[in-house]
Amino acid sequence: MAMALLVPRYTAAEVRRFPNDGLRYEVIRGELFVTPAPGTAHQRAVVEFTVRLHAYLTAHQLGEVLPAPFEVEFARDSAVQPDAIVILEAQRPRLSRKRLGGPPAVAIEIVSYSSKRTDRLQKRQLYQEQGVSEYWIVDLDRRQVERWRPGDTAPEILTVRLQWQPAPEVPPFAMDLPQLFATANA
């Protein structure tokens, strides 16, 4: 008789009680994901996105950008900490002092060796199912950004320019990707 392997299931509340030990603890559909602290290139990319998006969102009074560690809770068993999120004014009522309840307008993940599979599979599926309008997977080694939207079966691959227009009445946010990769990988 075969024995079933029991895999522990977690809730967001349980994961929040884990130690503050420099690791990132996330839970997707009850499955625990643990990621080590990121490296220098990763953090430089997070800073570049955060600074540029902050300037754009502030100039057009559209919302705000928040870097990790900051939690996005989708369900009792699904809470993640993207490297950065964009919250538009319409989403502000779902923002508390500790987390965002429900999807942000944009979720950004800078992939690292230890996070590639989670970022490209589990998080992508979660973000698409939960209605995150744009999910940007930034791959510093490949020097590209994968843009995913709900319903996409394949990403849009960007290597030169990233553009995003959250409202038709404002000019789009634009980022020169070769410059981003040069700064991050310096």
Image: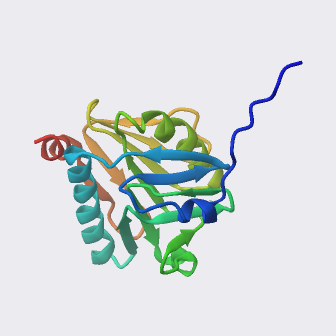
Q: How is the image coloured?
A: rainbow
Q: Position of residue 34 (x, y in %)?
A: 48, 46
- The vertical placement of 70 against 6, above or below, is below
Camera sees residue 99: yes
Where does the C terminus fall, quadrant-wise?
A: top left
Q: Position of residue 158 (x, y in %)?
A: 34, 38
Q: Position of residue 163 (x, y in %)?
A: 33, 51
Classify residue 124 by image quadrant.
Answer: top right
| In-front residue for pair 169/80 | 80
Residue at the farthest top position: 1
Please report the residue visible at 53 percent of the width from the left and 70 percent of the height from the top.
100
Q: Position of residue 95 (x, y in %)?
A: 52, 77
Residue at the farthest right position: 1
In-image side of 94 versus 156 (left or right): right
In-image side of 155 versus 151 (left or right): left
Where does the N terminus fall, quadrant-wise?
A: top right
Camera sees residue 103: no
Please report the residue visible at 15 percent of the width from the left and 45 percent of the height from the top.
179
Please report the residue visible at 69 percent of the width from the left and 62 percent of the height from the top.
76
In-image side of 27 versus 2 (left or right): left
Count of numbered marks: 0
Please report the residue visible at 24 percent of the width from the left and 45 percent of the height from the top.
39
- The vertical placement of 178 against 107, above or below, is above
